[in-house]
Amino acid sequence: MSKQTFIELVDVGVDFPVYNAASMSLKNRLLSSVTGGTIDREHDGVLVVRGLQEISLKISAGERVGLIGHNGAGKTTMLRVLSGIYHPTQGEATVSGECISLIDISLGIDPEATGRENIRLRSAMLGLTPEQTRRHLDDIIEFSGLGDFIEMPFRTYSSGMQLRLAFAVSTTVTPQILILDEWLSTGDENFRERAEERMRRVVDSTEILILASHSRTLLTANCDRIIWLEHGKVRRDGKAQDVLDEYFGPQPSALTHS
Amino acid sequence: MLKNFISSPLAAVADIQGAYHRYHLIGTLGWQDVATRYRRSRIGAFWLTINMAVMIVSIGFLFGRLFGQPIDEFLPYFAAGQIIWGLLATSINEGCTAFSSASGIILQVRIPLFIHVARVLWRNIIIFAHNLIILPLVFLFFMKPVGWVALLAIPGFILLLLNVTWIMLIVSAVCARFRDVTQIVQNAVQVLFFVTPIMWTAETLQGRVGALILNLNPFNSLLDIVRSPLLGQHPEMIHWVISIGLAVVGWIFALWFYGQRLKRLAYWL
């Protein structure tokens, strides 16, 4: 834990090979080397998509960074680079610190297993040790309000119960770097307030927050720095207020003041 | 130059070390895989044992008769061989899809990629343990004594696992990129099953061709170092040598090969 938490990208680029069925097969690869291998890579089906280009930035501990951009601007790719899943094809990316991305909170859940087993599974996936899981177990069961249902298979739960359990497990983590694709909520009226409070606790305890979102309110409330991606490049990177004003247009309240 | 040359194996070693530190995740996932398959059946994973037992008894009697082997010799031999081979073959076959079937996890959580390979291996070891129950029953039925030499099966088993693991590392990385290779590997494993003495014994195969098939087949050695001790024989020295040599050469190659592909793996899913 003594290691400093930061993320640094130096001239990072990500080229995406897009394999269709043809190029995924070895036969085509062999045939193309028999024919001399001069066939253009694009012709044998490997299209290279520029996911990200020339991205240099540094995020230090304490920063709350929002990520905006239209669909296809490279937000998901960027999140994967920032969480260390994609190694950039050009440049250098350093992610220092324990990083958890809560993108699909149901990841690792087995519908046939009981609620209790699923808590074990999901928290192992999030990097908790069995000991830590045991410590949080009661708290998770309490929050999800499942009671005796915890011993029943997950598939027998109502969708609200399923979501609450997944949410409760996912928010027990306290990573140094937290990556979110949109805010997590349970969607359940009765639980909204408690869920919000729980979510707030996770977000506040993390040293670096990366939040990709389309919601201005959310970004204004949580971020002090916004990175605006466009066509895989950083279009703007600066103070939240300034970048949001440029992206969404000036805030309505600001208009009435002037 | 040298730095480039050793950086891939080092990356592979770091990945495997990282996976080792998260052994409880491997354990949980592996158990879960076995549990899921038999979740709603009454006797659960012991169906594996029953399936294997039925197979061994039926084929054992048939082939014993076909080759004119005394059944009290042949059935224990076949049972041991089949169970060990089952571990080896399924691990390699399922190793092909270790990454592609875990793509959901890989694209969302940064965990050492070797975890996915180890998970496949671990679940097959669990299945192997279920099948292993058959052996004492067979030995008991034929009143076949088991001597101290059987303990040699333990180092043999470790050596077998070491070899299976490096093979899995290679096939998992190749098959993530070239999906067709999965089918090729499965066919190759099937052929290996027939050219390795499992359903037949080395004595039935005579002449130069026979010796060639046996001596050029390292899987014969891997099998023998576990099976022979169980049957009360010392494995021939040559089998130990081949198995150890294969493990050393295989691991060096696999670390380099796997390390080189580590960085690109997520893009292939």
Image (tube, helix red, strand yellow):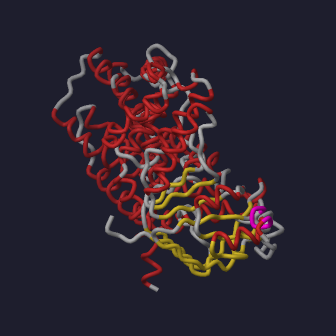
Determine the residue positioned at 52% across, 43% down.
B192
The foreground one among B70 and B140 is: B140
**Is A255 in the magenta?**
yes
Q: Position of B268 compared to B226: left or right?
A: right
- Locate residue B15, reporting x and y percent: 42, 61
Vertical placement of residue B189 versus A164, above or below: below
Determine the residue positioned at 33% across, 64% down.
A1
Q: Position of B71 compared to B106: left or right?
A: left
Determine the residue positioned at 78% across, 62% down.
A252
The foreground one among B260 and B26 is: B26
Vertical placement of residue B255 versus B54, above or below: below
Instruction: Check the image and name the residue furthest to the bottom.
Output: B1
Q: Position of B250 compared to A28: left or right?
A: left
Residue numbers of the magenta segment: A252-256
Instruction: Check the image and name the residue furthest to the left.
Output: B148
Instruction: Check the image and name the residue furthest to the right.
Output: A43
Q: Quadrant of the C terminus of chain B?
A: bottom right
